[in-house]
Image: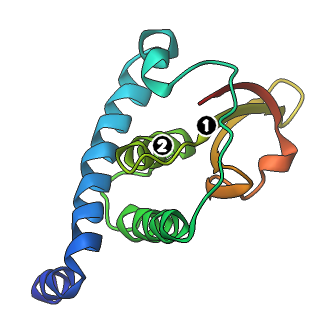
Amino acid sequence: MMFRQIRKYYSIDKTERKILNRIFLWLIYAFVLVRLMPLKWFNSVLGEFRKEAEVNLNNKQLQLIHMVKKNIRRIKKRLPWEVKCFEEAITAKKLLEVFNIKSTLFLGITRGNEKNLKAHAWLKSGDLFISGESGYSNFVVVGFYS
């Protein structure tokens, strides 16, 4: 089974393989940030607070975004930890920055039960969702970074 996955990895296009490797490294970075540090220590890494990026995407940028989305989904399944929405949004944002694609990371909260608050993070570039699109409408935006 392991050899099959290795063979599959090397059968992927070189550009996509590069993106997959970067995603893996950014997911580790995001894991450390989100789970071990308070937000106030690393919020400058996320970008400018309360500023939404204005974006006009061309076809090449749209292809890169779809490749990033696909490969984040691909690698999330194979990691030994559960990737949280905030980690996924940070990873996608940082990877898109490498390709000079502007995006906005949104943070939202909602009340689950009486005392239970739930948080969610999602990333958009223009009107296109990159991560966290499922259920985002149930959350009230409390902050965003561009």
- On the rendered structure, is 21 left or right of 92? left
Give, as a three-letter code, the residue at label 1.
Answer: Leu
Residue at the spot 78% in from the left edge and 54% down from the top edge: 135
- On the rendered structure, is 89 left or right of 116? left
Which is nearer the eye, 55 or 110? Answer: 55
- Residue 134: percent from left, percent from top: 73, 59
Quadrant location of the N terminus? bottom left
Residue matched to label 2:
93
Residue matched to label 1:
105
Mark 1 residue element: strand
- On the rendered structure, is 92 left or right of 104? left
Is label 2 in contact with label 1 (beta carbons under 8 Å)? yes
Instruction: Kindly give the residue lying farthest to the left in the view shown.
Output: 3
Quadrant location of the C terminus? top right
Residue at the spot 19% in from the left edge and 75% down from the top edge: 14
Question: For the residue carrying disc 1, how many other residues have a C-alpha within 10 Å: few (<14), some (14-19), or many (20+)?
Answer: many
Mark 2 residue element: helix
Residue at the spot 46% in from the left edge and 16% down from the top edge: 44
- Residue 63: percent from left, percent from top: 49, 72
